[in-house]
Amino acid sequence: MSMSQKLAYLHISGSFFILISLFSILTIFYGDYLIIKLNLENRFPKLAKFIQLRRKFQHFYILIDITISSIILIIIIYINIIFYF
């Protein structure tokens, strides 16, 4: 592959990963909204422990997604600047 094809492949891969990360962040927020709205912790006490565990890891998942997405965006911007000049 030529250099421009490699760069295009990197941009496409990075863009897909960022879309997947955004989808993951949205499911974290709306999943919690649905749990609260449908009152699942009180309706299903056996699931309450799982829901509490999910909430503990929720901030970790968001932090990982945002960090990796930011790193990929910085790499793509850096490559674009190098390719431009």
Image: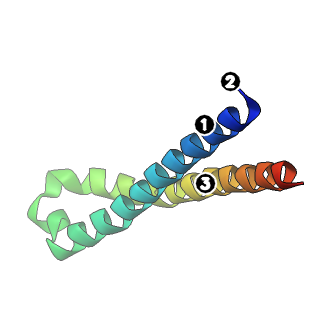
- Which tag, 2 or 1, sits closer to the chain's start? 2
Residue assigned mark 1: 9
Quarter of the view holding residue 56: bottom left
The mark closer to the camera, 2 or 3, is: 2
45 vs 23, nearest the viewer: 23
In the image, residue 51 lies at what x, y percent?
A: 29, 56
Residue assigned mark 2: 1
Q: Residues within 10 Å of mark 3 (few under 14, many from 20)?
A: many
Quarter of the view holding residue 5: top right
State left or right for residue 62 relative to residue 34: right
- Which tag, 2 or 3, sits closer to the chain's start? 2
- Name the residue: 22% across, 69% down: 34
80 vs 13, nearest the viewer: 80
In space, the residues marked 3 and 1 are separated at their CA atoms by: 17 Å
Secondary element under disc 3, as helix, strand or loop, is helix
- Name the residue: 66% across, 57% down: 70
Q: Amino acid at mark 3?
A: Ser
Q: Amino acid at mark 1?
A: Tyr
- Which tag, 3 or 1, sits closer to the chain's start? 1
In the image, residue 18 lies at what x, y percent?
A: 53, 53
In space, the residues marked 2 and 1 are separated at their CA atoms by: 10 Å
Contact (Cβ within 8 Å) of mark 2 with mark 1: yes
Residue assigned mark 3: 69
In the image, residue 74 lies at what x, y percent?
A: 74, 55
Q: Residue furthest right?
A: 85
